[in-house]
Amino acid sequence: MRCPFCGEPESQVKDSRPTEDGAAIRRRRLCPQCGGRFTTFERVQLRELTILKRSGRRTPFDREKLVRSITVATRKRPIDPERIERMVSGIVRRLESLGETELPSHVVGEMVMKALKALDEVAYVRYASVYRDFRQSEDFARFLSDEGLSDDGVSEDGEPVSAADGAR
């Protein structure tokens, strides 16, 4: 495994153990060139998945892209990184078990939304704001109201209604 610090092509494995959920092997490595220590994960890949984007473009499924998007949504939230890793592993397992090699991007997005909603409401709303492409504050208010995450509602014409306004 190439060292991420100096680029040395070889590294030594100092410790190997399964992750908490048993879905991967965690390896602690040492670079003989610069002495840098780093961690790698080895996972079983059941099949190559392809994601069909809304534009019609096809791209290979990228687990690390999934991890990055969830990490952005959960940034500065009190969530153990192991829980995020387990969540990502669960999503990947469910995608692979669908039996399809080509999946529409909305399938992945909806799985992430469901998992984040169960994990952390703030991360869920953050992810939804990008995934659902919120453009204005009213989009947030409507989403929060629809999801039952707000004491405030939105009127039928889309205008925010605060608790101070009372029922109309």
Image (cartoon, rainbow, N blue to C red):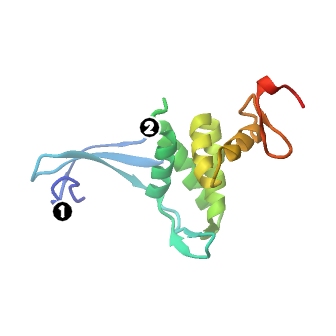
Give the percent coordinates (x, y) of residue 52.
60, 71
Q: Could you say whether the residue bearing mark 2 is in a helix, strand or loop? A: helix
Q: Position of residue 141 (x, y in %)?
A: 71, 40
- Could you tell which of marks 2 and 1 lies nearer the N-terminus? 1
Q: Is residue 84 above or below residue 108?
A: above
Judge whether 6 appears above or below 126 on screen.
below
Q: Which residue is mark 1?
A: 9
Q: Are there few (<14), some (14-19), or many (20+) residues within 10 Å of tag 2?
A: few
Q: What is the quadrant of residue 55 in the picture?
A: bottom right
Residue 40 in sight from this viewpoint:
yes
Amino acid at dot 2: Pro
Residue found at x 57% / y 48%: 90
Contact, mark 2 vs mark 1 (Cβ under 8 Å): no
Amino acid type of the residue that numbered disc 1 sits on in the rendered structure: Pro
Measure the alpha-carbon separation of dots 2 and 1. 28 Å
Q: Which residue is mark 2?
A: 81
Q: Position of residue 6 (x, y in %)?
A: 15, 56
> Which residue corresponds to the image point at 61% horizontal and 64% vertical from the top-left?
105
Instruction: Report which quarter residue 98 is drawn in.
Output: bottom right
